[in-house]
Structure formats: C-alpha cells, structure tokens
Amino acid sequence: MPKYKFLPLITAFAVAAGILTPLVIYDNLRFETVRYVISHKNLPAPFNGLRIVQLSDLHNNVFGEKQEKLLNAIKAEKPHIIVITGDLIDSDQTENAINLVKGAVKIAPCYYANGNHEIRTGRYLSEIKPALIRCGVKVLDDEKNYLEKDGEKIAVIGLSDLCGGEEDQRRALKTLAENEAFTLLLAHRPERFKLYSDCGVSLVFSGHAHGGQFRIPFTHQGVFSPGQGLFPRYTEGVFTRKSTKMTVTRGLGNQVIIPRLNNCFELVSVTLYKA
C-alpha cells in the first residue's frame, strides 16, 4: 500500500544509524599511538635513533583529567623532543590545550608552530603565544632552533601561519632552510608539501587535514579536508618527494561539530635513523 512505500528506506536508515552510531562515538572518544620509522641519508650520525612525538590539531580536546591519558601515552614513547604543529585551541577555549603543554614540557623539550585556528582568534600574538612561552614551549614563528649532539646539529624550523600566503611562506622557508644539512620543519598545512620539498627540507611534520574527517572503510582515503577539498591526498602517514619526507597526523581533535567516522584521533611517534 502507498503508506508503506517508504518503509524499506526508513528501515535501511534505521539499521545504518544503529550500526554507525556506536562506531562514531567510539572513534570520537579515543586516540591511538601510531609509530613510524623514517630513515634519511642526511641525518647526522649522532642523532641516529632520535625519537620525536608529534601533537597536532587538539582543538582543546580533553583526554582525562588535565590530559592525563594523553600525557601518559606521550611519556611511554620516551621522546627526545615533542613537536606541536598547530591548532591546539578551539575558538576561545584554551584550558585543555594549556594543560597539555604544561605536562608535555615536563617530558621533553617542546617545539611549536602555529596553525590557522590560533591566528583566527586575533589573540595569538597578544595572549596565546606568550602563554605557551610561559609554559616553557619553544615557539617558532618563521624561526629556527638547533638540536646539538657530539658536535653535530640539526635545525628545527617553525613555519608560521600568520601570513597564510603560500609565496610568503616560500620566501621565509627558503631563507630558514638555506645551508642547513638536515632540517625538521613544523608546518601546519600538508597541502604545501611541494613548497617544503622545493626548499630542501629533510623532514616535515604536518596536520590540519584531520584524517579526511570521514574515512572510507578498508582504505586510507579521507573524504574531505581543509585546503585540499574532496578526497584529499595528504591526510595521514608518511610521504616522500625527492629528498623530503613528510608525516601527516590525523590529529587529536575536531574543529567542527561534525564527528569523525572510521577515523580516530592519533598520537604520532617517529624514530629517525641514518639511511
């Protein structure tokens, strides 16, 4: 009868919702630690085995009281340094982000490059950056610092999202990376991988893509990310172009109310070796 003609469709939707709802809740409450081993011929020998934990796109998310669960996972990786690649905060909410960095600096030296959400507040230079510095974070706004060991060094560069323009970033990075034998770059936007590679960076740490928000089952393909649009290329994992490698993390939070699907949060741990 006509009044029942939509019953199969309604039933299908109900079944799908019943299946997907627990999965969505599960994915949006947990994180996993993902480990990569990366080799590079230019890595100075004293830094063989350097372990780096990457935090990105927290968006003021919380994992236990004062970030206890996340901090315990970081500590378990025994990192030599921690790199933070932007979007720690969400709009005007900063408390959980500050709790994370307060705990992280007690584990290992922390290096930070900002993301578009910090800049969007209009309070980055006046409030957010000073707060991070007070916590002991090394904030790198188009700046670099050095790791030194046994007479060798590698440069840690932070590329600021303050200007946002690709050509401005190219000019800044070209100057910062020039004449450096090995560089670690903290850059929020993975879609600019070609730019980073053209400037001769050795290893990039990036985020921003949120793993593509929805991930197609049985694949690593995300559906959408800012800066890349539909079916983005750079959403998670390790990528190589010429002599440059880039790790992209799915991040630790959401910037919008749209939940993740088949795409839990992640903490990235990278161990470097000389090729």
Image (cartoon, helix red, strand yellow):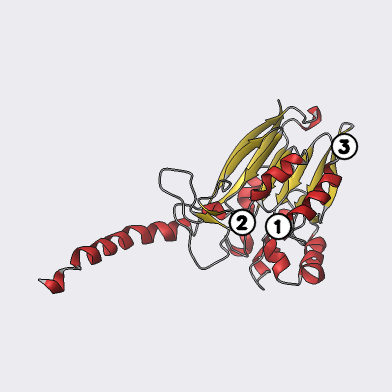
Q: Which residue ends up furthest to the front in the rendered image? A: 167
Q: Which residue ends up furthest to the right in the rendered image? A: 151
Q: How many other residues sit within 10 Å of disc 1, few (<14), some (14-19) or many (≥20)?
A: some
**What's under tag 2, amino acid-wise?**
Gly
Secondary structure category for the residue under label 3 = loop
Residue found 82% across the figure and 61% down from its top: 133
Q: Image quarter for residue 25?
A: bottom left
> Is residue 193 shown left or right of residue 209?
right
Secondary structure category for the residue under label 2 = loop
Camera-nearest label, 2 or 1: 2
Q: Tell which of 119 and 192 is nearer to you.
A: 192
**What's under tag 3, amino acid-wise?**
Asn
Q: Tell which of 87 and 266 is nearer to you.
A: 87
Q: Which mark is residue 189?
A: none
Report the Cα–Cα distance between label 2 and label 1. 31 Å
Report the Cα–Cα distance between label 2 and label 3. 30 Å
Give the residue number, with chain letter if any, for mark 3. 179
